[in-house]
Image: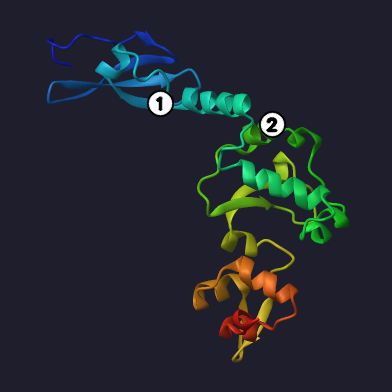
Amino acid sequence: MPKSILDLTGHVYGRLTVLSFYHRFEKRTKWKCICECGKLCIVRGDSLRDGGIRSCGCLKKEMDIEKCYIHGGWRTLEYKPWNCMMNRCYNKNDTSYSDYGNRGIIVCESWHDFNNFYKDMHPRPSLEYSIERIDCNWHYEPENCTWATDAEQAKNTTRSRKFNINGEEINITDICKKYNLNYSIIYWWLKKGYSIEEIISGSYKNV
């Protein structure tokens, strides 16, 4: 480490403890730090000293969860999937109730509180992701749920079956890719009684 640099080794800034000098570029120094959560990270010296960065990122996540708790979570990406999950399990008027609540699928008691659900599931990666049950015959609970895309879920559900199209055995996931279709659209029109050929051809659009 150049002698002209103020040594921050051993200093504590928020949750970060400086382990060693890492790099200097255009008069800005970077330091290797360890967070209280155990994660290593590289942080600029000025950000440490002025309090701009106080953790590896875990502090922001906790603050987001706290903000979610204070405001009920209704503005978050996670709230709509949670609300839909609750409806399909407990609202007999929900269009999906027959496949969930009526089959005995429930939401664990802890997740009846949105804030507990958020803490267990963590942030939803993007709008393309929804809740997936790893075992589709079991309930909504931390050990059985994750965020997944429609295509990923299609590979892990009892509704995923192979179809014979022009002599080729193909599942819904591959049909989505091959014909540029959305999984939820295929599943919906299959439930309405349309054949896979009619769905691929777009016949359902004339309804």
Q: Is residue 41 left or right of residue 131?
A: left
- Pointer 1 local density, CA inside 10 Å: few below 14, some 14–19, many at least 20: some
Q: Residue at x 63, y 41 (%)?
A: 79
- Position of residue 54 relative to residue 206, above or below, is above
Residue 161 horizontal/vertical position (percent): 70, 74
Residue 68 horizontal/vertical position (percent): 59, 29
Q: Nearer the viewer, residue 5 or 118?
A: 118
- Position of residue 74 relative to residue 136, above or below, is above
Measured in 3D between alpha carbons, the distance from the residue under mark 2 to the one under mark 1, in whole angstroms, is: 28 Å
Q: Nearer the viewer, mark 2 or mark 1?
A: 2
Q: Which mark is residue 196?
A: none
| Residue for badge 1 | 40
Q: Residue at x 32, y 22 (%)?
A: 32
Q: Residue at x 70, y 62 (%)?
A: 157
| Residue for badge 2 | 116
Badge 1 element: strand
Residue type highlighted by circle 2 = Asn
Residue type highlighted by circle 1 = Leu
Q: Nearer the viewer, residue 22 or 160?
A: 160
Display colour scheme: rainbow
Q: Residue at x 79, y 43 (%)?
A: 107
Q: Quadrant of residue 176?
A: bottom right
- Pointer 2 local density, CA inside 10 Å: few below 14, some 14–19, many at least 20: some
Residue 59 horizontal/vertical position (percent): 48, 22
Residue 99 horizontal/vertical position (percent): 80, 60
Q: How many marks?
A: 2
Q: Is residue 117 left or right of residue 176?
A: right
The earlier-in-sequence mark between 2 and 1 is 1
